[in-house]
Amino acid sequence: MDAAKGSVGDTEKAMSGAEFGLAISVFLACTVEAVEALTIVLAVGSARSWRSALYGVGAAVLSLAVLIAALGPALTALPIGVLRVVVGGLLLIFGLQWLRKAILRAAGLKALHDEAAAYGIETDQARAAGEAPTSGLDGYSFTIALKGVLLEGLEVAFIVLTFGANQHRVGLAAIAAGVAVALVAGAGVLARAPLARVPENLMKFAVGVMLTSFGIFWSAEGAGTSWPGGDAALLAVIPGVVAASVAMIAWLRAGARETPPVKATG
Amino acid sequence: MNRLAKAVWEFVVGDDWVTAAGVAVAIGLTAVIASAGTASWWVMPIAVLVLLAASLRRPR
């Protein structure tokens, strides 16, 4: 793929189709995970200590940035064939997990993630943990915010690293992730409430499709395949994955008509 | 070290090792067919279709 010949962090040159796919995938994945992390931070911040929760967020973001900065150059140093097999395989495993959950949710066989309900549960737990100290750091708020952001962020860091390293555009992937975090954080500050109206499952479906499609493409290339049409084969692979996924949703819905709908959970 | 390996396994593979193993087998099959000089691009799309359908049929 020509895009792989670019230099790390070179975000000024024109984006290829694959790089655009990279940016969109990272942006959507990061938005979804940031929405979920925001719910946790808002809950502990409003119920206990904003200062401690924000310290926890800062510590988690710093840890993720260090992880990306450390592993990014190491990954991009791998031979391109090895890199594509490893990255393609990992993206496929991750993408299939995202896609499976999104398909099950779309078919009504798995509960949709409800940010308002999750916020209520987190807030109740934060209040039940006792009084926050009036001075100094609140360990509960710090730990919960740190853990929440780190766990949600690890998956995004993984996507940034794998997608970015394979395209030799870790910088572009990191920028896409940063824009998503900034947008979600800004929306959270304005709303002062969990972003319950974000179409999370649709976004997760899109991320699953992109990770799976690029995973198919790169793992096959890394294993020695030449795709008919070269990079243009992605224009068939992506719609193919969408069509197969939509068909599977219809297949599952048809099979589930007899069973009662699943209630939303937090 | 064991805990780190377990955490990485949980993070990457999760509770669906069958899909992960299936992906590894499909990549290996692609490499074998490609090394024989035969077109092998079709292996991964078909494998993914089968793996996804199979994972949806497993208990949730």
Image: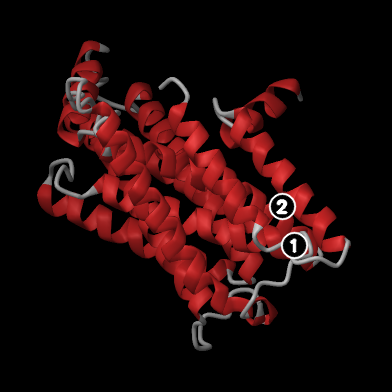
Relative side of A231 to A73, left or right: left
One can see residue A209 in this view: yes
Rendered residue at 20%/35% (across/down): A115
One can see residue A55 in this view: no
Q: Name the residue under label 2.
A: A86
Disc 1 packing (10 Å; few <14; some 14–19; many ≥20): many
Q: In which quarter of the image is the C terminus of chain A?
A: top left
Rendered residue at 27%/20% (across/down): A133
Q: Mark 1 points at which residue?
A: A222
* Mark 2 belongs to chain: A
Q: Position of residue A29 (x, y in %)?
A: 40, 53
Q: Mark 1 and mark 2: span between their CA atoms? A: 8 Å
Q: Where is residue A242 in the image (x, y as percent from the top left)?
A: 39, 57
* Mark 1 belongs to chain: A
Q: From what the image shows, is residue A3 above or below residue A141?
A: below
Relative side of B19 to A192, left or right: right
Relative side of A96 to A90, left or right: left
Tags 1 and 2 touching, CB below 8 Å? yes
Rendered residue at 26%/53% (across/down): A185
Relative side of B32 to A265, left or right: right
Q: In which quarter of the image is the N terminus of chain A?
A: bottom right
- The amino acid pointed to by label 1 is Gly
- The amino acid pointed to by label 2 is Val
Disc 2 packing (10 Å; few <14; some 14–19; many ≥20): many
